[in-house]
Amino acid sequence: MTLQPTSFPDLNVTLLYEELNHTNESHCPHSEAWEWLNTGQPVYMMFIAVLGIVLNTLVLTVFFLQKKSCTVAEIYLGNLAAADLVLVSCLPFWAISYANDYNWPFGQFMCKAVNVGIKINVYSSIYFLVLISIDRYIALVHPMSHGRMRKPKYAWLGCLLMWGFGLIMSIPEFVFREVNYFPKYNNSGCFLYFPSKHFAVGFEAMLTVLNFIIPISIILFCTVKIIRVLRTKIMSRLNADKTKHKATTLMLVVLLAFLICWIPFHLVTIMIWLLRIEVLGGCYITNVVNICKLVSNYPAFFNSVLNPILYVIVGKNFRKKVTDLFKQCGVTKTPLSERGHSNLSSTQNTF
């Protein structure tokens, strides 16, 4: 006998209790919101996956098939798009699992691999934004003294280190993710089981510091400095460096979108950590946290679709690159004189 849709909350709450090292005897009545959340989540995840794969593939195609070399800003945004592409490519597996009454039909290895892919995005994408913030900070606040640091080879090295960091931080997912059978629900689920409560508390505390407090602090510091410089230049009517201003505007919009989409996810992670150390507790609080855990995934996943849209809306030169790409593919033919003017313009602009 398989689970009915109304049984989703019971299984989810039971699993959260097990993750928090409570006993199986603990049971929380579920809210009516559960049925709506669990019914809509597979559709939402599949929609985000399809749209995200198309849009992020377009971004990567535009950046890496253009004739000239990528700028430092494009390298960072391209790697951010690649991280988003990894995330959205993993979502269909979970969408199918949720639609199948939380049953995981893809086996042990895919249980580990899919969640490693998702966590790599979570851990690395925020540090790509740290690199973007530092790059804009150097370009606007210290353009003369540290400008030599803004070279493509250093940008590629920084991105490589961030991918490595994300992979290392995802190792617990590969080690402790398991497919377990739950006889009560006649279901096999893919869940993360830490070896002990102390390990879980320590690991999640480390994640909170490394993946939230430190990067957010750096991003906020750089952003405040950048805004001050921009205000000063606007007040003094110094418009000589419009290229940097346009690039910085796009970066600030991307940063703001990321913070809005991902801060709820990290706050819920902190709440789960507080449940583990029993600062928070009780049936009602656990149920609320479990609902928030699901809800916070919605804006976090949407961010992987939002970034490419922002490039098109805010990035004037990105729209031009898209047009040039279609021209290269033979959609339209451009006269030689216009092509020369186009190449000159694209050389002068960053975004």
Image: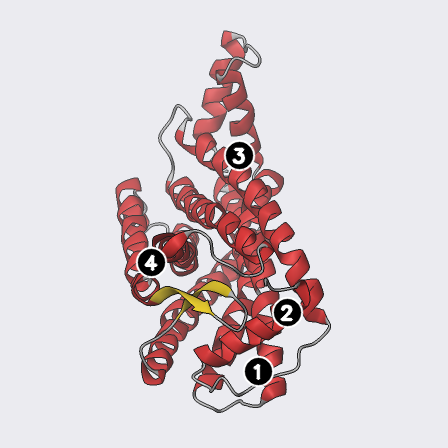
**Mark 2, secondary structure of its residue:** helix
Numbered disc total:
4
Q: Nearer the viewer, mark 3 or mark 1?
A: 1
Q: Which residue is mark 1?
A: 286
* Label 4 residue SS: helix
Mark 3 and mark 2 residues within 8 Å of each other at the beta carbon: no
Earlier along the polypeptide chain: callout 4 or callout 1?
4
Q: Is residue 186 above or below residue 276?
A: above
Q: Residues within 10 Å of mark 3 (few under 14, many from 20)?
A: many
Of marks 3 and 4, the one in the foreground: 4
Residue type (three-letter) at the residue carrying disc 4: Gly
| 132 up-or-down from 34: above or below | above
Which of the two labelled residues, at mark 3 and mark 2, occupies the earlier sequence position?
A: 2
> Does the image show residue 238?
no
Residue underneath mark 4: 166
Q: Is 224 placed above or below 78 here?
A: below
Tag in front: 4 or 1 = 1
Q: Which mark is residue 318?
A: 3
Distance between mark 3 and mark 4 Cα atoms: 28 Å
Dot placed on the residue nearer the N-terminal end, 4 or 2: 2
Type of the residue with mark 1: Thr
| Measured Cα–Cα span from mark 3 to mark 1 | 45 Å
SS type, badge 3? helix
The type of residue carrying mark 2 is Ser
Percent coordinates x, y for residue 258 in the rendering: 53, 58
Distance Cα–Cα, label 4 vs label 2: 35 Å
At 59% from the left edge and 47% from the top edge, which residue is drawn? Answer: 46
In contact (CB < 8 Å): disc 4 and disc 2 = no
Q: Give x and y (percent) for residue 206.
A: 34, 75
Q: Which residue is mark 2?
A: 7
